[in-house]
Image (cartoon, rainbow, N blue to C red):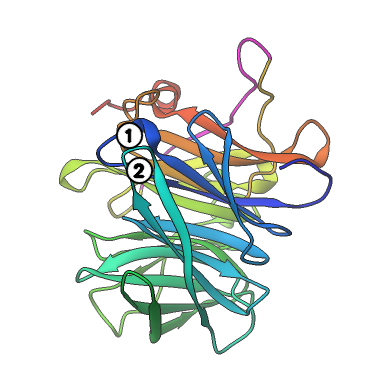
Amino acid sequence: MAGNGDMADDPALWVHLSNPELSLILGTNKVEGLFVYDLAGREHQRLDIGRVNNVDVRGNLVVASNDEINGLSWVRITPTAEGALIRHIGDTRVRRGAPYGVCLGLIDDDPVAGVTYTDGSVELWQARVTADTVSAELIRTAKVGSQVEGCVFDDSERRLFFGEEDHGIWSLDLADPSASPREVDTITAGRGLVDDVEGISLYTAENGAGYLVASAQGADRFIVYERQPPHKVVGAIRVASSEDGIVDGVSHTDGIEANSASLPQYPRGVLIVQDDANPGIEEDQNFKLVDWRDVERALSLPSR
């Protein structure tokens, strides 16, 4: 995203099921809208939908938190033989202040957006989607002590993870409407997490296996946890420059996306991370792709 300033924030991966080579990366630009890239990093499309901060995908549905409308913007992706048709299909205004972060999941096959706020609130909005329209209603609210941004659903385990930036990571039991958030890890525990706790994503594998990944922005690193409780810390990684020096290293990461989908270049999945400096701070911010096999090697993880 060429230019100076804090623009790039959060990525999400859409997988083209019949032709994974045509899969797309969606990245938010907090000034210009939603950018869409192919897997080679070439810009595919821009959607001028306002000042979007976070974005997530489930199936062919996309949601972005949008400061300009004080709400959520919904986008539909229609796969084609040549690629995809991407359309903005509607907006949902939220009731409290501007939404900060957003994630998208499925609860009982219904799409639900998790919406986070600077006051520590987390809301669940259930969506009703047709080919051309979307509507959503608030179905649940939780709250922690301070600013929350990154979140991710674990659909099959009926769990929501979210990050309180100056405190740590929480989980919320979606199967129990009366459940309160439970701590997964805290900054004070000293297991590698530092403030700000930013992007959070989930690498899923069969039979409930997989990993929760969080961006510890203040230390330029990523903490990897086991997907299942008690969410043991597996290790921490940094993303260095490429061996040939063409791609620089990653610092001060905000949003991330971990995905286990098999892609032509990344047969065991990919980790996509926002990079703040290229090369200077808040200069030409972008998103960088890491082969999940490199994560496995760095942390001695068993491959699928």
Which residue is drawn at the image coordinates 29% and 73% (left, top)? 174
Q: Residue furthest bottom?
A: 95
Mark 1–mark 2 Cα distance, whole angstroms, equals: 6 Å
Mark 1 and mark 2 in contact? Answer it, CB < 8 Å. Answer: yes
Q: Is residue 167 above or below residue 198?
A: below
Q: From the viewer's perspective, is 2 left or right of 274?
A: right
Determine whether the residue tagged by mark 1 lies in a helix, strand or loop.
helix
Where does residue 186 sit, x and y in percent of width and height? Answer: 52, 58
Whether residue 164 is visible: yes
Q: Which residue is identified by label 1?
A: 20
Where does residue 302 sit, x and y in percent of width and height? Answer: 28, 26
Residue range (magenta): 232-245
Q: From the viewer's perspective, is 301 left or right of 13?
A: left
Frontmost residue, 34 versus 161:
34
**For mark 1, does the 10 Å Cα neighbourhood hold few (<14), some (14 to 19), or many (20 or more) residues?**
some
Q: What kind of secondary structure does the magenta stretch mostly adopt?
A: loop
Q: Earlier in the sequence, mark 1 or mark 2?
A: 2
- Which residue type does callout 2 highlight? Val
Which residue is drawn at the image coordinates 69% and 24% (left, top)? 248
Frontmost residue, 59 versus 203:
59
Where does residue 10 sit, x and y in percent of width and height? Answer: 58, 52
**For mark 2, does the 10 Å Cα neighbourhood hold few (<14), some (14 to 19), or many (20 or more) residues?**
many
To which quarter of the image does residue 161 belong?
bottom left
Viewport quadrant of the C terminus: top left
Please tell me whether residue 99 belongs to the stretch shown in magenta.
no
- Which residue type does callout 1 highlight? Pro
Please tell me whether residue 235 belongs to the stretch shown in magenta.
yes
Q: Is residue 279 above or below residue 117?
A: above
Q: Which residue is identified by label 2?
A: 15
Which residue is drawn at the image coordinates 61% and 70% (left, top)? 66
Q: From the viewer's perspective, is 239 left or right of 282?
A: left
Determine whether the residue tagged by mark 2 lies in a helix, strand or loop.
loop
